[in-house]
C-alpha cells in the first residue's frame, strides 16, 4: 500500500471528476434561480429575508451533514457516504422544474445541502487518505479547484440553457445529466479508501520519526476521541482550531453574497443571464484556477500567512464591486474576490488536516466544514438583515467586507503556522 498522488493517480482523477460534478450540481442553482426569483418563482421585489431563505436552509443543512459525514465515513466507509449523497440529489431537478412556489425551491435546496455535505466532504477525505502529508496543500487545492471550476461552468452553462430553453427546462436537463452521471461513476469507478486511513494510523508515528518533523497535534487528546470531544476541541478548546473554524464560517458570507445578491444586483443593473453567468463565473474560475497554485504554494511557504491575507484580499474584492459599474469593473472585482478566496480556501482545510491525528482527521474535517458551511446560513441571515436595515443590496456588501477584515485579524492573532516542516512540534 503506497501513499501519494502518482501511485494512486487513477483514483485521484476519479475523485476530481466527482468533485467537478458536485460543483456543477450546486452551480446550477446559483445564477438562474436567484436572478429570476421574482418573475419565475413569485418572490416579491425587495423581500430580502424571503430571498435568502433558500441559502439559509442550505447552510444549516450542509453544515450539519458535514459533521455527520465525517463520523459516518469512519464507520461505513467513504464510498457509501458518497453514494448516499448522490441518491439524495436525484429529485432536485424535478423539484425545480415543477416548483409552484419559492417553498419548493427552499426544499430542493435542503436536499442540495444534504448532497453537498456528504459528497464534497468525501471527495476531500478520500484524497487525503491516499496521498502523503507533504501533498496536502496540493491535494486540497486540486479538490477545490475542480469543484469551483464546476460551479463556474454550471453558472455560465445554465445561463445559456435558460435563455435557449427556458429556465425550468434548462435546469431540468442540465441537472439530470450531471447528477445521473455522478451517481453512475460513484457506483462503478470510485474505490473505498478507509483502509488507507487505518494504515496511516498504524504508520504515522514511524513516519514522523523517519522524517524528523512531528505535527503540532493538540495535547491531551486520546487516539480515539468521542464526537463530543472532537467538537469541543475544534470549536473552543484548541485556539488554533477555533481560529480556523471562525475564519471558515465568515468566509462563507462571501459565497452567500455571491449566490444570493450578486445575480440580483447585476440583474437590476440590466445585465443579461449569460452576462451574469460570466461575471459570477470570473469569481469562480479565478477561485478555482488559482487554488491549483495556492494549495501547492502553502506546502512550500506555509498556510498561516496565505489564510490571513486571503481574508483581507477577498473582502476588498467584495467591497469594490458596488463602487463602480460596467462589466470590466465588476469582472475585475470578482477576480480580486476570487483570488483572495483561492489564497485561503484550500489552506484553511489543509491547516486542520496538518494538526488533526489520522485516527480522527475525518471527524475534524467534518466539524471544520460544519462551522464553515454554517456560514452560509448565518451569513445569509446577516445579508438579509443588512439589506433590509440599510434599504438596499449594497448594504450587504459592506457587511461582508467588514466581517472578512475582522475575521482575518482574529485568525492572524489566534492562529499559527501548522505545516509540520515549517513549525514542527518540539
Image: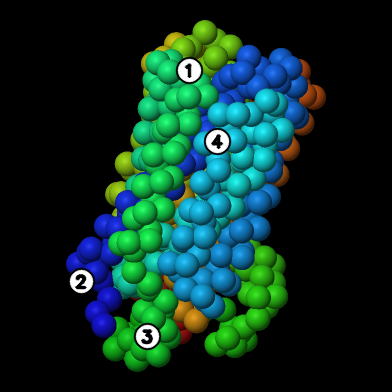
Which of marks 2 and 3 precedes in the sequence?
A: 2
Marks 1 and 4, how far apart at CA: 15 Å
Q: Nearer the viewer, mark 3 or mark 1?
A: 1
Label 2 secondary element: helix
Q: State the residue position of label 2.
A: 7
Q: State the residue position of label 4.
A: 94
Query: Are the residues flagged by discs 1 and 2 in contact, CB closer than 8 Å?
Result: no
| Residue at point 60%, 47% (across, down) | 111
The quarter of the rendered structure image containing the C terminus is bottom left
Which of marks 3 and 4 precedes in the sequence?
A: 4
Q: State the residue position of label 3.
A: 199
The quarter of the rendered structure image containing the N terminus is bottom left
| Residue at point 30%, 49% (across, down) | 293
Q: Estimate the x, y position of residue 62 in percent, counting from the top left.
A: 61, 52
Q: Residues within 10 Å of mark 4 (few under 14, many from 20)?
A: some
- In the image: residue 9, left or right of residue 302: left
Give 107 or 318, whichever is nearer the viewer.
Answer: 107
Q: Estimate the x, y position of residue 13 in percent, counting from the top left.
A: 27, 57
Marks 4 and 2, how far apart at CA: 41 Å
Give 176 or 373, whichever is nearer the viewer.
Answer: 176
Rendered position, 258 above or below 162: below
Label 3 secondary element: helix
Q: Which residue is situated farthest in the right direction here?
A: 389
Label 1 secondary element: loop
Q: State the residue position of label 1.
A: 166
Rendered position, 386 above or below 241: above
Q: Which residue is situated farthest in the top direction here?
A: 270
Marks 3 and 2, how far apart at CA: 16 Å
Q: Estimate the x, y position of residue 383 in percent, counting from the top left.
A: 69, 32
Q: Nearer the viewer, mark 4 or mark 3?
A: 4
Amino acid at each position: 500500500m503506497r501513499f501519494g498522488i502518482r501511485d494512486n493517480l487513477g483514483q485521484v482523477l476519479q475523485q476530481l471528476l466527482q468533485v467537478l460534478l458536485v460543483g456543477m450540481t450546486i452551480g446550477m442553482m446559483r445564477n438562474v434561480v436567484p436572478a429570476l426569483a421574482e418573475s419565475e418563482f413569485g418572490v416579491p421585489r425587495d423581500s430580502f429575508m424571503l430571498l435568502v431563505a433558500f441559502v439559509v436552509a442550505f447552510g444549516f443543512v450542509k453544515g450539519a451533514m458535514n459533521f455527520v459525514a465525517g463520523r459516518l465515513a469512519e464507520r461505513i466507509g467513504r464510498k457509501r457516504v458518497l453514494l448516499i449523497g448522490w441518491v439524495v440529489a436525484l429529485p432536485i431537478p424535478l423539484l425545480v422544474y415543477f416548483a409552484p412556489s419559492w417553498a419548493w425551491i427552499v426544499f430542493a435546496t435542503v436536499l442540495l445541502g444534504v448532497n453537498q455535505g456528504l459528497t464534497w466532504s468525501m471527495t476531500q477525505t478520500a484524497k487525503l487518505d491516499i496521498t502523503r502529508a507533504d501533498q496536502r496543500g496540493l491535494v486540497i487545492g486540486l479538490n477545490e479547484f475542480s469543484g469551483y471550476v464546476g460551479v463556474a461552468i454550471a453558472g455560465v452553462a445554465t445561463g445559456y440553457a435558460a435563455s435557449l430553453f427556458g429556465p425550468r427546462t434548462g435546469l431540468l436537463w442540465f441537472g439530470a445529466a450531471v447528477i445521473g452521471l455522478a451517481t453512475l461513476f460513484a457506483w462503478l469507478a470510485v474505490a473505498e479508501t478507509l483502509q488507507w486511513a487505518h494504515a496511516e494510523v498504524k504508520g504515522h508515528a514511524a513516519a514522523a520519526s523517519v522524517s524528523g518533523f512531528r505535527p503540532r497535534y493538540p495535547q491531551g487528546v486520546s487516539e480515539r476521541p468521542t464526537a463530543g470531544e472532537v467538537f469541543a476541541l475544534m470549536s473552543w478548546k484548541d485556539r488554533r482550531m477555533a481560529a480556523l473554524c471562525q475564519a471558515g464560517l465568515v468566509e462563507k458570507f462571501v459565497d452567500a453574497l455571491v449566490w444570493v445578491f450578486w445575480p440580483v444586483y447585476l440583474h437590476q443593473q440590466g445585465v443579461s443571464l449569460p452576462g451574469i453567468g460570466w461575471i459570477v463565473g470570473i469569481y469562480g474560475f479565478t477561485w478555482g484556477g488559482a487554488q491549483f497554485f495556492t494549495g501547492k504554494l502553502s506546502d512550500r511557504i506555509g498556510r498561516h500567512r496565505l489564510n490571513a491575507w486571503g481574508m483581507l484580499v477577498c473582502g476588498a474584492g467584495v467591497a469594490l464591486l458596488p463602487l463602480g459599474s460596467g462589466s470590466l469593473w465588476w469582472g475585475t472585482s470578482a477576480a480580486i474576490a476570487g483570488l483572495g478566496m483561492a489564497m485561503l480556501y484550500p489552506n484553511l482545510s489543509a491547516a486542520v488536516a496538518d494538526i488533526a491525528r489520522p485516527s480522527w482527521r475525518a471527524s475534524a474535517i467534518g466539524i471544520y466544514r460544519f462551522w464553515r458551511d454554517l456560514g452560509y446560513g448565518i451569513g445569509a441571515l446577516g445579508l438579509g438583515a443588512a439589506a433590509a436595515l440599510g434599504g438596499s443590496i449594497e448594504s450587504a456588501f459592506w457587511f461582508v467586507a467588514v466581517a472578512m477584515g475582522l475575521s482575518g485579524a482574529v485568525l492572524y492573532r489566534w492562529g499559527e503556522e501548522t505545516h509540520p516542516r515549517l513549525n514542527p512540534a518540539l
